[in-house]
Amino acid sequence: MKNSVLHVTDVHKSFGGLQALSDVDLNVEEGTTHAIIGPNGAGKSTLLNVCVGRLKPDHGHVVFNGEVLDEHTPDEINQLGVSRVFQTPEIFPDLTLLENVLIPAFASRDGSFSLRPFSKLRKETEIRDRAEQALADVGLAALKDREAAALSRGDKRRLELAMCLIQQPKLLLLDEPTAGMSRHDTNRTVDLLKTIKARGMTKVIIEHDMHVVFSLADKISVLAQGKIIASGTPDEIKGNPKVQEAYLGGAH
């Protein structure tokens, strides 16, 4: 059995009278891609927000590599090795692609996302070389001097992924990485994520596109009404009657 990287144990989270998460248990093994699927409003993004410290659980715990994350800030959790790609790309639109990647590169080293003078940043060739390599890894090297605002949605998602990869995370969380993409951009993103998977990086992915899920996932957990109703391999999930009823609509 592989080592566990992320443990979510008995997590509850409510907003007023709305119970967003209830009795959630999740175990993510090292080097795997673990997909979380479920209908809209199931609590998927809430679960990721709890994992990265944007929300505190009302009950239960999140443990990453033996470290209890419940009382850590998002910046502290990032420094521990957890990076997240958001549903809506969080980039600096007025900066170039290279500048966008340099910011988290220095944050990873210095523990702060402060905007330092880019004339000084560019003198530090080692980090600049790493930033250029991160852009090359996601297929954006030729656009490094272009302003990020001019990118297509698919390329903005790849830029945000490069901003995560430059930090060399131990765990990468991806919230709807192909949302709003054309089929061409979706296929390119799937190929990119397969390349990252081949390097052994542990990933948790939220995704509605079942083609993407079944192309990437080693294990799938299904959320419905804030509870995990099934977990298993892709084949096990495809054949699970509860999943077909709650999410897959009976289709394989």
Image (spheres, rainbow, N blue to C red):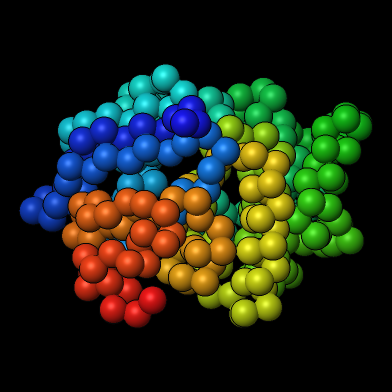
- Residue 74 is situated, as x and y percent measured from the top left of the image, at 45, 34
Tell me if 242 is positioned left or right of 48 in this view.
left
Q: Residue at x 14, y 52 (%)?
A: 19
Residue 235: % across, % down: 42, 62
Q: Residue at x 21, y 48 (%)?
A: 21
Q: Position of residue 100 (x, y in %)?
A: 72, 48
The residue that appears at 63% across and 44% down in the rendered structure is: 164
Point out the image quarter for the C terminus: bottom left
| In the foreground, 236 or 31 | 236
Does residue 8 show up?
yes
Is 155 situated left or right of 35 in this image? right
Q: How many marks?
A: 0
Q: Residue at x 65, y 29 (%)?
A: 108
| Residue at the farthest top position | 66
Q: Is residue 167 left or right of residue 50?
A: right
Task: Report x, y in % for residue 203.
Answer: 53, 45
Q: Nearer the viewer, residue 228 or 82?
A: 228
- Residue 156 visible in image: no
Q: Residue furthest left?
A: 17
Give the answer, above or below, for where 174 lies relative to 147: above
Q: Nearer the viewer, residue 64 or 191?
A: 191
